Image: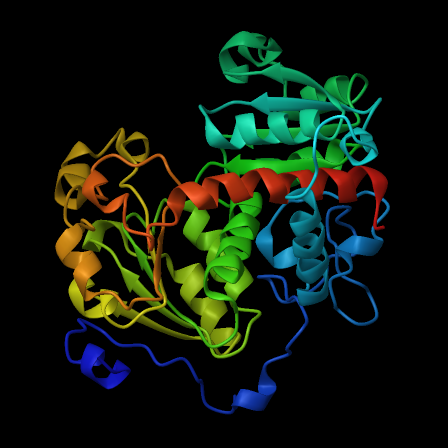
Amino acid sequence: MKVMQITKTMKTMKTMRPAGMGASSRRAGTSVRASGARDPTDPTDPTDASTGVASWLDEPLKHVIESQQFSKAALAEIFRVSREMEDIRPNTDEARQLQGRIMSTLFYEPSTRTRLSFESAMARLGGTVLSTESAGEYSSAAKGETLEDTIRTVEAYADVIVLRHFQAGSAKKAAAAASVPILNAGDGPGQHPTQALLDVYTIQREIGRLDNIRIGMVGDLANGRTVRSLAYVLSMYENVQMYFVAPDVVRMKGDIKTFLTEQDVEWHEVDDLRAVASDVDVLYQTRIQKERFQDRPEDYEKAKGKYIIDLDTMALMKKDAVVLHPLPRVDEIDPACDDDPRAAYFRQARNGLYVRMALLKLALNGTV
């Protein structure tokens, strides 16, 4: 099925090439902040003042705050090191690269894969972990301590802090107060940059390219920080087409669509999952996040269960396409799909270990 056939099923169609912006206006290999400009007073701003090009690899303090802070060159280096991490074996010199270094995981929201993969990553490189889960309940935050004071205290005990928080923008706030690297492990409905990096790494490993791909993002696109971060990263690659498939109450937010428009990235909002499934290279499913609907349960009921990937969906997909999911899943992918080789979500979770090993190595030891 070609793209023109897909557009017949669309409730709305957005072909993103604003007046006066041709294909040549995209700045391949650069990373543009959502605001479009560097803030010289912001210590977490990674862009070079003279060129506007992200230079995360050259930063003395390598925070990981948001997906758009990375350039393609930085991503290529992160992925190169991630590939090296796949080959590390216990009791070797490579497995002792972070010996003597300490990582603190400070999680104010529940996590399984992100927290454990970061902790495993640090352990596999010889480092030590100081961990706290449910930090909002069991840390001094329960006594009224500010996030900034918590960060200034914890950095006395650790060389790097991995932070998950329920408020969007909390990672940037933490980085502004920190003298050690802050790695954003998810800030409410804001962003989840390390997830985006492992997603893009998985796409590259699974289908062999990042340019010239079509991706369908499905499910809770309004509250899903993973799809927001992924959209930012994929916007840096050439000829990427994005299809947003979501119930009306959880459609992709306007700031992402505006950003993609400004970057001359083609995107569409689509109602028909089957039409998209037959045409994309990557189908990225997400769960409807019940915890984001505490004050509007009626909207959750409208959204849940509308788009489910099952064996019939898999039958429509191309033979070399893949299904990804940041996990956990509830009922949005039928477990019967798990044995299909195109179901890559558990391989995706394992790739998170390697990407986070690479980020810890680069943040603490620099480039090789």
Q: Position of residue 172 (x, y in %)?
A: 65, 41
Q: Position of residue 241 (x, y in %)?
A: 40, 74
Q: Is residue 92 above or below residue 229?
A: above
Q: Quadrant of residue 107?
A: top right
Tell me which residue sits at (17%, 50%) in the image: 310
Q: Is residue 364 above or below residue 7?
A: above
Using the image as rendered, state which of residue 62 and residue 37 is in the foreground. Answer: 62
Q: Position of residue 73 (x, y in %)?
A: 72, 65
Say how many tags the image has: 0
Using the image as rendered, state which of residue 42 and residue 246 is in the foreground. Answer: 246
Using the image as rendered, state which of residue 359 and residue 91 is in the foreground. Answer: 91
Q: Is residue 260 left or right of residue 183?
A: left
Q: Position of residue 74 (x, y in %)?
A: 72, 59
Q: Is residue 222 above or below residue 52?
A: above
Q: Quadrant of the N terminus?
A: bottom left
Tell me which residue sits at (58%, 12%) in the image: 144
